[in-house]
Structure formats: structure tokens, C-alpha cells
Image (cartoon, rainbow, N blue to C red):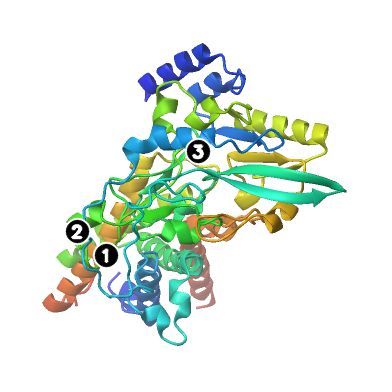
């Protein structure tokens, strides 16, 4: 970890990219969360980021064994994208980033807004918190990753994700070695914010190749401040700062996101842009009760004991 | 020790809590929809991961209170008759300790301002699941041997 961190510092110092905030290296060395800012007014939808993502992460893409195991019960169908690896107009196990386009009229002006879509890397990610197997987890630097060595492909992460981002490929992963017909169904895939490049002191491929400098990476508090400044300057709107309790992907757009949400194509692999309350809010509130219950139990036992002793003493006096 | 704990260990409330925790714990795995339970009228909620997660928290809160209340009562007794605990009772107590330890850490991990490394998360998840499975096996063994937590 220390080697990676050192490499990261050295690498970032050498990048000279304007899309990397100067304090990024220090924040990374302190183990702080890094966030990305996407200025949607700059994105021209050229697709360079999508291409770079595919090229950079190709070595992580699934190589399924066929035929797939026969699944029981028969209602469980395998998910197979291996023959559709070129699909780039939605999220798939082979396409972790794609561009949504919204044609809208806002305040009398016509806009074409291009929106790079991928995992938002939530601050308190339900995919990681509710994965019963530890396969999805958040790293100190804010990256939310699915471990393809242990993921069983149950797709719970996709169901609990407010944007249903992770996508499944069958015929790969640990389930093949356990109970392939009865439990699991492959591995879930999504953006891992190029964690390997970050460890090597590089920025994610989508940031590096963007000809428009749409994205900026840096410590989350600075990215949020920059997003607010940018939104104020353009009279724009922010998405991702508070969604699902806060994410590490902050979009700034000249058009309100509810307007964009109505204009984009949504469905499987094509996430929405509507506002999202904190999925983990109830658990966050209940946590104190769970953690406090042992103390409360011990205290109750102590208090009933004191009460009993005083009653016994009173009884002795009465006799 | 020989009177009070036995009533709670064999108590219906305790058993109901354990069953509820086992059920909502199993519901954290995506199996109830796959294996048709959620298709049974009135059981659709078994496939609701968030609902079952919250129920798991609530049941854990009640059970932890009961366990630690009983532990407190035991500890304040002048003559703690530890020798009354059966071998299988000791095994189950240690498994309970592991289950509670991993469960509480898992709850802490789900808080937004607390961070555990991915490696620790795997250890906690597999540990919690493993302790739940071996607790079930130990309980079964206890039934077969006719041994509870305490000697008669």
C-alpha cells in the first residue's frame, strides 16, 4: 500500500494535467477520498473516454467458459454479453462507461447535453454494505470495487444500487467452483475508477484522454467547492453531491437534472438522473441502537440488581 | 445461574429472535426470489433486501439487550456457578461471541464515517456467515446429545 501511495504521489507530480487538482497527491497520501467533477457544459460526446475505458480495462473483462452450467431452477437465466462486447450505448460487463445524450430546451435555449455515465462511487455504498459476501467494498481513496475473484454474481449489488449500475456476466468466477447450478450466476462488473492506474500514479483513463477536460479529480471537499463555484458561474445545477447520501462523482450542468432525466433514454444499463435519497439512512440511524444494546442490557441488569438489594435491605429492616 | 438463565435460553422470545435473525440473515443472500419463496402470496417481502436488513438490525438490537441483560445478572451473582455450563454450552457461547463481534463490526462498517479495508470486510462477512452456520450445527449437536447450555 505504501509503495502504491508513493508511486501515486510521484506519478501525479509528473502528470502536469490540469484535470488533477494540486492537492490530490497529498490527499491520496493521507488516505482521503478522491472525487471527480464532470463539467457537462464541456462534453461534446466524442466517445474518447468510452474507448479509453474499454482499452484500459480490457484485461479485466470476463472470459467466460461455455457452455454455461445448467441452472436450477430453470427460471434462473445466464447473463451473456460475451458476443456483444462492442455494445457501447449502455453499461455492460464489457462497457463500464457510456455517454447519454439529452436534447432539451431550457429557458428558451436549446441544449445538447452529453453525460458520461458510470458508477458514481457512493460515499456509503449500498452495493458494498449489503453484499453478503464481502465481494463489493469501498477503498480508502473512495473507489468502490467488486472483487471478481470472489463475486458470485447474485446481482444483489445491482438491485440495491439506486442506479442499478453493476452488470453480470455468467460463466466466470468463483460460483463455477462451488455450486454452479444452484448458487450464484457469474460475476458483476462496473467502473473501478482505474484503481490500478491510480496505484501506479496515473489518473483514470477517461480523465486522461478527454480532449475537452470535462473531468477533474481531487480531494472530495475541494471538488465539491469547485463544483459549487462552477455551478454559480454558469448558473447551473449539481448532481451527485447529495444523491444517495453523497457520491464521489459530481456532475455540473447548465440544465436542471430533472429536465435531463426526462430527456434521456432510461432502462436496463441506462441509469436515470432523478434525485436519490440516502439508501442507508435507516441503517445509519439504527446503528446506535444495535451498538448500544449490549451496554443497555448490562446497565439494566445492574440497575435491577441495585433495586433488588435495596428492596431486600428494606425487607430486613421491616422484619 | 442454574435457574434464571435456563428460562431465558429456552424462552420463546429468545428462540423467536434467533429464528428471525437467521431468516433475515439468509434473506441477505439473493435466494428467496430464486427459490420461489418470494412468489408465495404474502411472502414477497422476503426478497426485499433493504427491509430484511433493517429487520435484522432491529432483531439484533433486542437479542443483544436480552443476552447482555442475562450476562449482567449472571455476573452480579455472588456464586457464579460456571461449572454448570455444559461442554456444548461453552462451544455455543464462544460461537455467540464470534457472531456478536463480527455483527457489531459489520454494523460499524456500514456507517458512513467508519472505514474498514476490503480485506477486513471479507473477513467480517465470511466470519459472520460462518459463525451463524456453526452455531446452527452446534445447536443441532446439542439437541442430539440432549445437552442445553446448563446441566440439569
Image location of residue A64, percent across then percent down? 26, 51
Mark 3 or 1: in front is 3
The quadrant where residue B98 appears: bottom left
How crowded is the residue under tag 1: few (<14 C-alpha within 10 Å), some, or many (20+)? some
Q: Is residue A295 visible?
A: no
Q: Same subunit under labels 3 and 1? A: yes
How crowded is the residue under tag 2: few (<14 C-alpha within 10 Å), some, or many (20+)? few
x 34%, y 73%: residue: B34
x 37%, y 62%: residue: B71
Image quadrant in which the N terminus of chain B is located: bottom left
Asked if labels 2 and 1 touch by Cβ distance under 8 angstroms, the answer is yes
Q: Chain of mark 1?
A: A
Q: CA distance from mark 3 to mark 1?
A: 33 Å
Q: Same subunit under labels 1 and 2? A: yes
* Residue carrying label 2: A178
Asked if labels 1 and 3 touch by Cβ distance under 8 angstroms, the answer is no
Image quadrant in which the C terminus of chain B is located: bottom left
* Residue carrying label 3: A50
Q: Chain of mark 3?
A: A
Q: Which mark is residue A183?
A: 1
Image location of residue A92, percent across then percent down? 43, 51
Image position of A204 (left or right of B33): right
Q: CA distance from mark 2 to mark 3?
A: 35 Å
Figure check: A1 above or below A245: above
Residue ranking furthest to the left: B145
Depth check: give the residue in front, A148 or A262: A262
Q: Earlier in the sequence, mark 1 or mark 2?
A: 2
Depth check: give the residue in front, A268 or A127: A268
- Please, what secondary structure does the residue beneath circle 1 have? loop
Q: CA distance from mark 1 to mark 2?
A: 8 Å
Amino acid at each position: 500500500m505504501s509503495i502504491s501511495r508513493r508511486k501515486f504521489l510521484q506519478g501525479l507530480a509528473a502528470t502536469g494535467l490540469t484535470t488533477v487538482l494540486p492537492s490530490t497527491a497529498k490527499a491520496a497520501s493521507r488516505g482521503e477520498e478522491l472525487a471527480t467533477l464532470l463539467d457537462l457544459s464541456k462534453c461534446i460526446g466524442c466517445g474518447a473516454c468510452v474507448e479509453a475505458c474499454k482499452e484500459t480495462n480490457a484485461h479485466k473483462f470476463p472470459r467466460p467458459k461455455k457452455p454455461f452450467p445448467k441452472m436450477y431452477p430453470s427460471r434462473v437465466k445466464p447473463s451473456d454479453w460475451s458476443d456483444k462486447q462492442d455494445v457501447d450505448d449502455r453499461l455492460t460487463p464489457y462497457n463500464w462507461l457510456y455517454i447519454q445524450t439529452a436534447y432539451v430546451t431550457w429557458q428558451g435555449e436549446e441544449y445538447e447535453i452529453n453525460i458520461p455515465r458510470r458508477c458514481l462511487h457512493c460515499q456509503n455504498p449500498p452495493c458494498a454494505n449489503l453484499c453478503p459476501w464481502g465481494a463489493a467494498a469501498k477503498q480508502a481513496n473512495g473507489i468502490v470495487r467488486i472483487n471478481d475473484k470472489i463475486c458470485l454474481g447474485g446481482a444483489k449489488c445491482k438491485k440495491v444500487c439506486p442506479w442499478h449500475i453493476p452488470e453480470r456476466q455468467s460463466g466466470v468466477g468463483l460460483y463455477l467452483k462451488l455450486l454452479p447450478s444452484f448458487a450464484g450466476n457469474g460475476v458483476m462488473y462496473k467502473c473501478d475508477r482505474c484503481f490500478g492506474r491510480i496505484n501506479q500514479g496515473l489518473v483514470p483513463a477517461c480523465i486522461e484522454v478527454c480532449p475537452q477536460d470535462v473531468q477533474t479529480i481531487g480531494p472530495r471537499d475541494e471538488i465539491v467547492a469547485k463544483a459549487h463555484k462552477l455551478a454559480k458561474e454558469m448558473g447551473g445545477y449539481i448532481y451527485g453531491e447529495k444523491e444517495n447520501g453523497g457520491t464521489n462523482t459530481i456532475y455540473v450542468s447548465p440544465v436542471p437534472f430533472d429536465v435531463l432525466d426526462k430527456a434521456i433514454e432510461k432502462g436496463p444499463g441506462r441509469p436515470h438522473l432523478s434525485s436519490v435519497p440516502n439508501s442507508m439512512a435507516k441503517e445509519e440511524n439504527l446503528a446506535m441502537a444495535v451498538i448500544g444494546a449490549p451496554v443497555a442490557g448490562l446497565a439494566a441488569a445492574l440497575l435491577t440488581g441495585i433495586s433488588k438489594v435495596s428492596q431486600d435491605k428494606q425487607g430486613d429492616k421491616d422484619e | 445461574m442454574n435457574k434464571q438463565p435456563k428460562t431465558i435460553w429456552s424462552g420463546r422470545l429468545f428462540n423467536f429472535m434467533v429464528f428471525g435473525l437467521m431468516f433475515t440473515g439468509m434473506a441477505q443472500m439473493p435466494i428467496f426470489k430464486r427459490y420461489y419463496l418470494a412468489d408465495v402470496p404474502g411472502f414477497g417481502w422476503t426478497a426485499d433486501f433493504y427491509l430484511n436488513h433493517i429487520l435484522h438490525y432491529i432483531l439484533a438490537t433486542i437479542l443483544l439487550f436480552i443476552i447482555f441483560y442475562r450476562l449482567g445478572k449472571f455476573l452480579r451473582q455472588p456464586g457464579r456457578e460456571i461449572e454448570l455450563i455444559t461442554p456444548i454450552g461453552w462451544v455455543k457461547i464462544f460461537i455467540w461471541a464470534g457472531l456478536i463481534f463480527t455483527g457489531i463490526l459489520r454494523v460499524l462498517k456500514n456507517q458512513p464515517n467508519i472505514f474498514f479495508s476490503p480485506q477486513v470486510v471479507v473477513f467480517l462477512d465470511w466470519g459472520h456467515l460462518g459463525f451463524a452456520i456453526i452455531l446452527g450445527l452446534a445447536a443441532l449437536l446439542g439437541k442430539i446429545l440432549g445437552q442445553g447450555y446448563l446441566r440439569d
